[in-house]
Image (cartoon, rainbow, N blue to C red):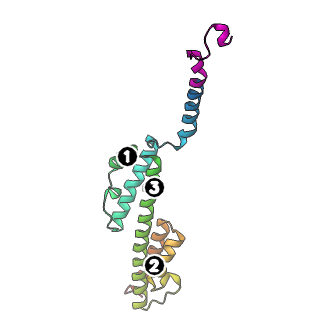
Amino acid sequence: MGRAERGVPATVETPYDTLPTMYHLGLGLVLFSILAAPGIASAAGACFCDGYAEQAAHDAALAQRFACDFHGDRWLKDVDTHRTWCRGATQATVEAEAAARTKDLRLCMCQWYADTATAQAATNAGHGCGFAGPRWTLDRSAHYRWCVLAKVPLATLESEVETRRALLAKCTSTDR
Protein backbone atom coordinates (compact mmCIF):
# COMPACT_ATOMS: atom_id res chain seq x y z
CA MET A 1 0.00 0.00 0.00
CA GLY A 2 1.55 3.29 -1.17
CA ARG A 3 1.40 6.76 0.50
CA ALA A 4 -1.52 7.99 -1.55
CA GLU A 5 -3.57 4.88 -0.78
CA ARG A 6 -2.88 5.36 2.95
CA GLY A 7 -3.92 8.98 2.73
CA VAL A 8 -0.45 10.36 3.53
CA PRO A 9 0.78 13.33 1.50
CA ALA A 10 4.02 12.68 -0.41
CA THR A 11 5.92 15.33 1.57
CA VAL A 12 5.17 13.90 5.03
CA GLU A 13 7.65 11.38 6.47
CA THR A 14 6.28 8.46 8.45
CA PRO A 15 8.13 6.07 10.81
CA TYR A 16 7.83 3.44 8.11
CA ASP A 17 9.85 5.62 5.71
CA THR A 18 12.93 5.50 7.99
CA LEU A 19 12.86 1.72 8.59
CA PRO A 20 14.91 0.76 5.53
CA THR A 21 17.54 3.36 6.49
CA MET A 22 17.65 2.14 10.10
CA TYR A 23 17.75 -1.47 8.91
CA HIS A 24 20.69 -0.76 6.62
CA LEU A 25 22.44 1.23 9.32
CA GLY A 26 22.03 -1.62 11.81
CA LEU A 27 23.13 -4.20 9.27
CA GLY A 28 26.16 -2.05 8.47
CA LEU A 29 27.12 -1.82 12.15
CA VAL A 30 26.80 -5.57 12.60
CA LEU A 31 28.94 -6.26 9.53
CA PHE A 32 31.52 -3.70 10.61
CA SER A 33 31.84 -5.25 14.07
CA ILE A 34 32.27 -8.72 12.59
CA LEU A 35 34.83 -7.67 10.01
CA ALA A 36 36.73 -5.28 12.25
CA ALA A 37 36.89 -7.59 15.27
CA PRO A 38 40.15 -9.34 14.30
CA GLY A 39 41.92 -5.99 14.03
CA ILE A 40 40.70 -4.69 17.36
CA ALA A 41 43.34 -5.01 20.09
CA SER A 42 42.31 -7.14 23.01
CA ALA A 43 44.05 -8.20 26.17
CA ALA A 44 46.11 -11.37 26.09
CA GLY A 45 44.42 -14.46 27.52
CA ALA A 46 45.15 -16.01 30.91
CA CYS A 47 46.79 -19.20 29.59
CA PHE A 48 48.92 -17.21 27.17
CA CYS A 49 49.97 -14.87 29.99
CA ASP A 50 50.83 -17.75 32.32
CA GLY A 51 53.23 -19.18 29.75
CA TYR A 52 54.63 -15.76 28.94
CA ALA A 53 55.25 -14.97 32.62
CA GLU A 54 57.03 -18.27 33.29
CA GLN A 55 59.30 -17.77 30.26
CA ALA A 56 59.99 -14.13 31.15
CA ALA A 57 61.05 -15.06 34.70
CA HIS A 58 63.19 -17.93 33.35
CA ASP A 59 64.87 -15.58 30.86
CA ALA A 60 65.54 -13.07 33.64
CA ALA A 61 67.24 -15.78 35.69
CA LEU A 62 69.38 -16.73 32.68
CA ALA A 63 70.32 -13.09 32.17
CA GLN A 64 71.52 -12.96 35.77
CA ARG A 65 73.41 -16.24 35.38
CA PHE A 66 75.26 -14.91 32.34
CA ALA A 67 75.89 -11.51 34.00
CA CYS A 68 74.05 -9.69 31.22
CA ASP A 69 73.70 -6.48 33.24
CA PHE A 70 70.18 -5.82 31.99
CA HIS A 71 67.91 -3.42 33.87
CA GLY A 72 64.19 -2.66 33.94
CA ASP A 73 60.95 -4.55 34.33
CA ARG A 74 61.73 -6.83 31.39
CA TRP A 75 64.39 -8.49 33.52
CA LEU A 76 62.49 -9.02 36.77
CA LYS A 77 62.45 -12.63 37.98
CA ASP A 78 58.97 -12.30 39.53
CA VAL A 79 56.42 -14.39 37.61
CA ASP A 80 53.43 -12.50 39.04
CA THR A 81 54.76 -9.14 37.85
CA HIS A 82 55.11 -10.44 34.30
CA ARG A 83 51.68 -12.12 34.45
CA THR A 84 49.97 -8.94 35.66
CA TRP A 85 51.62 -6.83 32.96
CA CYS A 86 50.68 -9.36 30.29
CA ARG A 87 47.01 -9.44 31.26
CA GLY A 88 46.80 -5.68 30.75
CA ALA A 89 48.55 -5.70 27.38
CA THR A 90 47.51 -6.83 23.93
CA GLN A 91 48.81 -10.17 22.74
CA ALA A 92 50.73 -8.42 19.95
CA THR A 93 52.47 -6.18 22.50
CA VAL A 94 53.33 -9.17 24.68
CA GLU A 95 54.70 -11.10 21.71
CA ALA A 96 56.86 -8.12 20.73
CA GLU A 97 58.17 -7.87 24.30
CA ALA A 98 59.00 -11.57 24.38
CA ALA A 99 60.81 -11.32 21.03
CA ALA A 100 62.86 -8.34 22.22
CA ARG A 101 63.81 -10.15 25.44
CA THR A 102 64.79 -13.27 23.49
CA LYS A 103 66.98 -11.23 21.15
CA ASP A 104 68.72 -9.40 24.01
CA LEU A 105 69.29 -12.63 25.92
CA ARG A 106 70.65 -14.44 22.86
CA LEU A 107 73.19 -11.67 22.21
CA CYS A 108 74.26 -11.67 25.85
CA MET A 109 74.65 -15.46 25.93
CA CYS A 110 76.73 -15.27 22.77
CA GLN A 111 78.95 -12.65 24.42
CA TRP A 112 79.43 -15.03 27.34
CA TYR A 113 80.14 -17.93 25.02
CA ALA A 114 82.64 -15.96 22.92
CA ASP A 115 84.47 -14.74 26.04
CA THR A 116 84.58 -18.24 27.53
CA ALA A 117 85.62 -19.97 24.29
CA THR A 118 88.38 -17.41 23.69
CA ALA A 119 89.70 -17.80 27.24
CA GLN A 120 89.73 -21.57 26.83
CA ALA A 121 91.52 -21.25 23.49
CA ALA A 122 94.12 -19.02 25.18
CA THR A 123 94.63 -21.68 27.86
CA ASN A 124 95.12 -24.24 25.09
CA ALA A 125 97.74 -22.06 23.41
CA GLY A 126 99.41 -21.04 26.67
CA HIS A 127 99.86 -24.60 27.89
CA GLY A 128 100.84 -25.93 24.48
CA CYS A 129 98.00 -28.45 24.53
CA GLY A 130 97.96 -28.59 20.74
CA PHE A 131 94.20 -28.63 20.23
CA ALA A 132 93.29 -27.16 16.84
CA GLY A 133 90.32 -26.27 14.66
CA PRO A 134 87.51 -23.74 14.88
CA ARG A 135 86.72 -24.75 18.47
CA TRP A 136 90.18 -23.53 19.51
CA THR A 137 90.49 -20.27 17.60
CA LEU A 138 91.71 -17.23 19.50
CA ASP A 139 89.44 -15.05 17.34
CA ARG A 140 86.69 -13.97 19.74
CA SER A 141 84.57 -12.54 16.94
CA ALA A 142 84.55 -15.94 15.19
CA HIS A 143 83.09 -17.57 18.30
CA TYR A 144 80.54 -14.77 18.62
CA ARG A 145 79.51 -14.90 14.94
CA TRP A 146 79.06 -18.68 15.10
CA CYS A 147 76.82 -18.36 18.13
CA VAL A 148 74.70 -15.53 16.75
CA LEU A 149 74.39 -16.61 13.12
CA ALA A 150 73.82 -20.30 13.80
CA LYS A 151 71.33 -19.48 16.60
CA VAL A 152 72.98 -22.16 18.67
CA PRO A 153 70.82 -23.46 21.54
CA LEU A 154 72.06 -22.85 25.08
CA ALA A 155 72.57 -26.58 25.65
CA THR A 156 74.99 -26.71 22.70
CA LEU A 157 76.90 -23.68 23.95
CA GLU A 158 77.24 -25.26 27.38
CA SER A 159 78.29 -28.58 25.82
CA GLU A 160 81.01 -26.85 23.80
CA VAL A 161 82.32 -25.08 26.89
CA GLU A 162 82.25 -28.32 28.90
CA THR A 163 84.01 -30.27 26.14
CA ARG A 164 86.82 -27.71 26.05
CA ARG A 165 86.99 -27.68 29.85
CA ALA A 166 87.37 -31.47 30.01
CA LEU A 167 90.05 -31.53 27.31
CA LEU A 168 91.95 -28.69 28.97
CA ALA A 169 91.74 -30.44 32.34
CA LYS A 170 93.55 -33.45 30.88
CA CYS A 171 96.14 -31.23 29.23
CA THR A 172 96.86 -29.01 32.20
CA SER A 173 96.82 -31.66 34.92
CA THR A 174 100.13 -32.50 36.59
CA ASP A 175 99.62 -36.18 35.67
CA ARG A 176 100.27 -35.50 31.99
Q: Which residues are magenta?
A: 1-22
Q: Position of residue 49 (x, y in %)?
A: 42, 45
Residue placed under numbered mark 1 in the picture = 83
The amino acid on which the numbered mark 1 sits, given as a three-letter code, is: Arg
Tell me the quarter of the image containing the N terminus: top right
The amino acid on which the numbered mark 2 sits, given as a three-letter code, is: Arg
Residue 11 within the magenta-colored segment of the rendering: yes
Asked which quadrant contains residue 29, the reply is: top right
Residue placed under numbered mark 3 in the picture = 96
Residue placed under numbered mark 2 in the picture = 164
Quote the CA–CA distance across marks 3 and 1.
15 Å
Q: Are marks 2 and 3 in contact (CB under 8 Å)?
A: no
Element assignment for label 1: helix
Element assignment for label 2: helix
The amino acid on which the numbered mark 3 sits, given as a three-letter code, is: Ala
Of circles 2 and 1, the one toward us is 1
Asked which quadrant contains residue 114, the reply is: bottom left
Q: Position of residue 43 (x, y in %)?
A: 43, 42
